[in-house]
Image: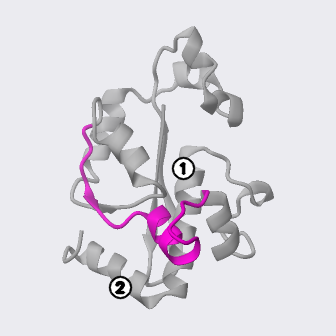
Amino acid sequence: MEIGIARVDLDRNRVYPEMGRIVMQQLTPGQRRSWVFEHTDLDPDEVERSPWSVRDVRAELAGYEGKVFTGYNIDFDFGRFLRSGPWDFRPRMAPCIMIECADRFNGGCWMKAQDAYDMLCPGNPAGVPGGMEEHRALSDAVLEGYILLGLCGRDPDIRGRYVRAAEGSEC
């Protein structure tokens, strides 16, 4: 229903919002009661009235082919959604931010993105209202970008892995 992309500049220590799209679709009554509408400010009518069709967003995603992507729980976002129909989006992948956080700070156990953000990003650099994750695609992508910057700032080895992934020598 919604796709968000943020660009992380490891050299300048900045995160830039790139793309946020609500993908138009007609929702069933069950879909209108789904988690995303109960726990975010996304409205089912926004989805049904969105100006961006699947075809539009797929064409926009095609412009990102060959770029390096990561996320917080990439198996969920990419494995469950973006690598399959209708998207079939297969960019080069860098290590999963959630796995890096789990391995470094939580004894191998997964952490919520909010907990990782609170630990690694004092002062709310993403400017998230109330400092709390909104569970919207673009704002979550920005928040995850700041988590990545926090990780890289604490551990030069992690930064090196992401730099090598971006250069194409490690994916």
Q: Position of residue 59 (x, y in %)?
A: 28, 38
Quick check: 152 above or below 171? below
* Mark 1 vs mark 2, CA separation in Å: 26 Å
Which residue is disc 2 drawn over?
A: 160
| Label 2: which secondary element | helix
Q: Which mark is residue 37?
A: none
Nearer the N terminus, badge 1 or badge 2?
1
Q: Residue at x 34, y 32 (%)?
A: 56
Q: Position of residue 75 (x, y in %)?
A: 38, 50
Q: Are marks 1 and 2 in contact (CB under 8 Å)?
A: no
Q: Position of residue 80 (x, y in %)?
A: 37, 39
Q: Identity of the amino acid at label 1?
A: Leu
Tell me: 23 left or right of 163.
Answer: right
Q: How many marks?
A: 2
Q: Which mark is residue 138?
A: 1
Mark 1 crowd level (few <14, some 14–19, many ≥20, 10 Å Cα): many
Q: Identity of the amino acid at label 2?
A: Gly
Decide if residue 15 is in sight here: no
Quick check: 37 above or below 67? above
Quick check: 171 above or below 40? below
Q: Quadrant of residue 96?
A: bottom left
* Residue 111: in magenta span: yes
